[in-house]
Amino acid sequence: MNSGADLEKYLHDKIPLTVAMGVRVAECDDTHLILTAPLAPNRNHLGTAFGGSLHSLATLSGYSLLWWLLRAPDAHIVIRQSEIRYEKAVTGELRAFCRAPDADELAGFRRDFARKGKARLSLSAMIEQDGVLAVQFRGVFVAVAAKK
């Protein structure tokens, strides 16, 4: 995985929902990831972002960042648990921001994955509307090494 474009292609190939939602990788590096999606295919009957789309985009931001940081393209990543709070309606582009864990936490995750072939990591994401927090998300993700 060399770029955000590579990650976006992976998401579109492996998770068809990302195509329907119009998910794009806006930024991606070892410190954070930002996913976006247009409002139109993700709107509800009120013309605001559908809660399921917001939850999906937040989940995808954690999944994508972990996939990027793990650097094991064949690893299986799943969400084990999630919690979400909807603070404000989103009336424009959906934009999920997920920050990488601190260096010690990431090192421990990588060490466990290398040693056991399985590790878990908690990640938080947020979605803002015009600079105001709209959604808070926290998820526990599990990565399992692919069987050889």
Image: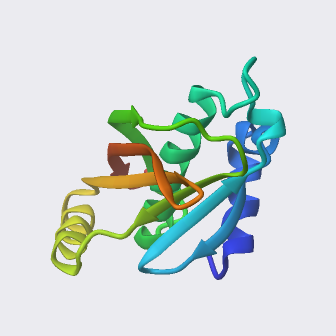
- Residue drawn at point x = 39 percent, y = 67 percent: 99
Residue 49 in the image: state x and y as whole percent: 67, 34
Res. 71 visible in picture? no
Res. 131 visible in picture? yes
Residue 47 in the image: state x and y as whole percent: 76, 28
Does 106 sit above or below residue 62? below
Does 25 sit above or below residue 88? below
Along the viewing direction, whichever of 6 and 133 lies nearer the viewer: 133
Q: Quadrant of the N terminus?
A: bottom right
Left or right, 108 with respect to 99, comes to: left
Residue 50 in the image: state x and y as whole percent: 65, 28
Does 39 sit above or below residue 44? below
Figure disc tally: 0
Residue 144 in the image: state x and y as whole percent: 36, 50
The type of colouring in the image is: rainbow
- Residue drawn at point x = 58 percent, y = 45 percent: 57
Along the viewing direction, whichever of 90 and 56 lies nearer the viewer: 90
Left or right, 2 with respect to 59, comes to: right
Left or right, 122 with respect to 26, comes to: left
Left or right, 148 with respect to 139, comes to: right
- Residue drawn at point x = 41 percent, y = 69 percent: 70
- Residue drawn at point x = 83 percent, y = 38 percent: 40
